[in-house]
């Protein structure tokens, strides 16, 4: 069995993992992921009990219980690279023996639910709605660095999208990964289904033009018109594809749910979106408390 070198899995002197500063005993099986460290408090204020609070850089964690169910809420910061760190370290906390630096024979499955904000790219999706990313599309290329990428991706959807958009070959090839099917069914009554793009940036990768012109100024129009077996691409965000892909490769359950705070078609944005986010958090906690 492979022993993981200290340079590959860095463990702090207090027995915590390098970036998250969490010890294995501090992590619940149900993990809520949020981007903004300030949003951790919005989730944790609902907890009935709190076991621990840990902070390092943008990674803030609270573990406690809600309606008798143990949960962890963790802020990831913005972007795909941070999801790579968070999901890898969360998996290591439960599936690697820190004493021997070897994988455990029996794997523990985590439930990872990201609660984020997003911009809609279809005219019928309103600000304040919750979109469940039944499929996440990555523009970032991260998953291609991992063995088994094609095993967890919808290759037919990928090929259809590449053809439809005339995808620029020097950009990372997009990949499509489905959320956990059981989570999709569990949240189906409180969300609307979507295919969500996770972009590696906020501006040109999402079709925004401030001073630097995007390579393809018509890419968003192509995305909006894309149809695959009656399904449309619904919204943009910046983390869901890596979460879906890494979780699928590692054997965890994962999903992304986003509150819509901008309507890209109508060129509208709501900067006072906190009430919508609070409603999403309360809804998600209630649903997770009843999840087996």
Image: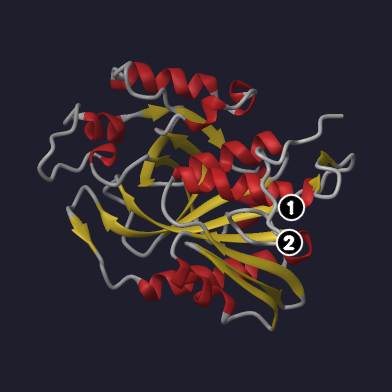
**Left or right, 198 with reference to 289:** left
- Residue 31: which quarter of the image? bottom right
- Callouts 1 and 2 close, C-beta under 8 Å: yes
Numbered disc total: 2
Q: Colour scheme in the image? A: secondary structure
Q: Please report the residue visible at 46 percent of the width from the left and 43 percent of the height from the top.
A: 80
Give the image location of residue 158, x and y in percent.
Answer: 46, 23
Task: Name the residue furthest right.
Answer: 105
Quadrant position of the C terminus in the picture: bottom right
Residue nearer the viewer, 94 or 259: 94
Q: Is residue 47 above or below residue 159?
A: below
- Residue 104: which quarter of the image? top right
Q: Is residue 72 above or below residue 98?
A: below
Give the image location of residue 162, x and y in percent.
Answer: 37, 19
**Left or right, 200 with reference to 221:** right
Task: Name the residue furthest left.
Answer: 211
Q: Which residue is mark 2?
A: 23
Crowding at label 2, few (<14), some or many (≥20) Cα neighbours within 10 Å? some
Counting residues from the start of the chain, the first of labels 1 and 2 encountered is 2
Give the image location of residue 200, x and y in percent.
Answer: 37, 40
Quadrant position of the N terminus in the picture: top right
Numbered circle sitting on residue 93? 1
Q: Tag 2's secondary structure?
A: loop
Numbered circle sitting on residue 226? none
Q: Is residue 21 above or below residue 98?
A: below
């Amino acid at each position: 069995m492979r022993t993981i070198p200290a340079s590959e899995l860095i463990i702090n002197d207090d027995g915590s993992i390098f970036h998250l500063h969490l010890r294995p005993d501090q992590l619940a099986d149900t993990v809520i992921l949020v981007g903004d460290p300030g949003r951790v408090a919005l989730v944790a204020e609902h907890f009935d009990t709190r076991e621990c609070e840990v902070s390092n850089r943008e990674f803030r964690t609270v573990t406690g219980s809600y309606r008798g169910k143990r949960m962890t809420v963790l802020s990831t910061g913005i972007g795909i690279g941070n999801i790579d760190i968070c999901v890898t370290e969360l998996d290591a906390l439960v599936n690697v023996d820190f004493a021997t630096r070897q994988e455990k024979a029996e794997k523990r499955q985590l439930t990872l639910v990201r609660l984020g904000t997003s911009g809609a790219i279809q005219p019928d999706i309103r600000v304040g709605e919750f979109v469940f990313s039944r499929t996440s599309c990555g523009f970032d290329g991260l998953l291609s660095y991992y063995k088994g990428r094609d095993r967890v991706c919808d290759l037919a959807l990928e090929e259809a999208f590449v053809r439809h958009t005339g995808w620029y070959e020097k950009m990372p090839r997009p990949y499509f990964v489905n959320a956990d099917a059981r989570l999709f069914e569990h949240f189906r009554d409180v969300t609307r289904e979507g295919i969500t793009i996770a972009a590696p940036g906020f501006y040109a990768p999402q079709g925004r033009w401030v001073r630097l012109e995007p390579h393809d100024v018509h890419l968003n129009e192509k995305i909006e018109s894309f149809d695959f077996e009656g399904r449309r691409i619904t919204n943009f965000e910046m983390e869901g594809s890596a979460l879906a892909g890494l979780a699928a490769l590692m054997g965890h359950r994962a999903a992304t749910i986003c509150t819509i705070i901008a309507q890209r078609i109508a060129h509208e944005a709501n900067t006072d979106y906190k009430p919508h986010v609070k409603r999403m958090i309360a809804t998600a906690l209630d649903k997770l408390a009843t999840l087996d």
